[in-house]
Image: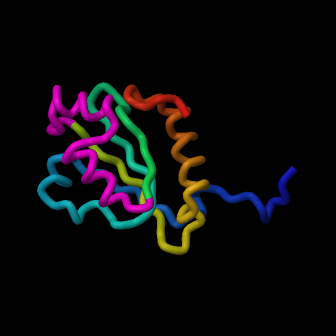
Amino acid sequence: QLQPELVLRVADWDRQILTHSAAEVTADRKLVPDAPGVYIFRDATGYLYIGESSSLRQRVNQHLDRSDRKSLASYLSENGASNITIELHAFGKDSPAKDKTRRRAYESELIRSRKPKLNIAP
């Protein structure tokens, strides 16, 4: 069993949660922090795609311009981005989430609990 002082809770990771429409992000790319974190694409039907990146701004903009994830690219091509909301979980520079392994574990937990339609199960 882990010692209480060794347990890292996401709530202690210096996390900021921001939500913007895809249209807002497309109009002003700087709305997305240039910080490590996890991003969540969703529409009125629910969660679409969850991912992690060392640079949220770069990765979210890649998805909006032309995603390399076939399922998300197909969705955006067929439906556009006008009905999409992007939730950003941005972490501070001194956060434990600057470590990719921890971000991936957080991303995997979000995928497991929210079951986005377009992710392949980790």
**Residue 16, relative to residue 19: is it above or below?**
below
Q: Taking 50 as reference, is 64 left or right?
A: left
| Chief SS of the magenta region | helix
Q: Is residue 17 magenta?
A: no
Looking at the image, the residue that sits furthest to the right is 1
Q: Residue at x 83, y 54 (%)?
A: 2
From the viewer's side, name the closer residue of 76 and 17: 76
Task: Please give the name of the residue rendered at 15% of the width and 34% of the height, measured from the top-left corner.
Answer: 80
Q: Does the magenta portion include 56?
A: yes
Residue at the extreme bottom of the image, as rendered? 94
Question: In x, y percent, where is residue 48?
Answer: 35, 32
Q: Position of residue 19 (x, y in %)?
A: 31, 51
> Which corner quadrant of the image does residue 32 belong to?
bottom left
Q: Position of residue 77 (x, y in %)?
A: 17, 31
Taking 69 as reference, is 73 left or right?
left
Q: Quadrant of the C terminus?
A: top right
Residue at horizontal 19 percent and vertical 47 percent from the top: 65
Residue nearest the observer in this picture, 86 or 68: 68
Instruction: Magenta stretch: give its range.
Output: 54-83
Colour scheme shown = rainbow
In this view, the residue in front, 77 or 47, is 77
Tell me which residue sits at (53%, 65%) in the image.
Answer: 98
In terms of depth relative to the viewer, which is nearer, 75 or 5? 75
Q: Total marks drawn?
A: 0
Can you tell which quarter of the image residue 102 is in? bottom right
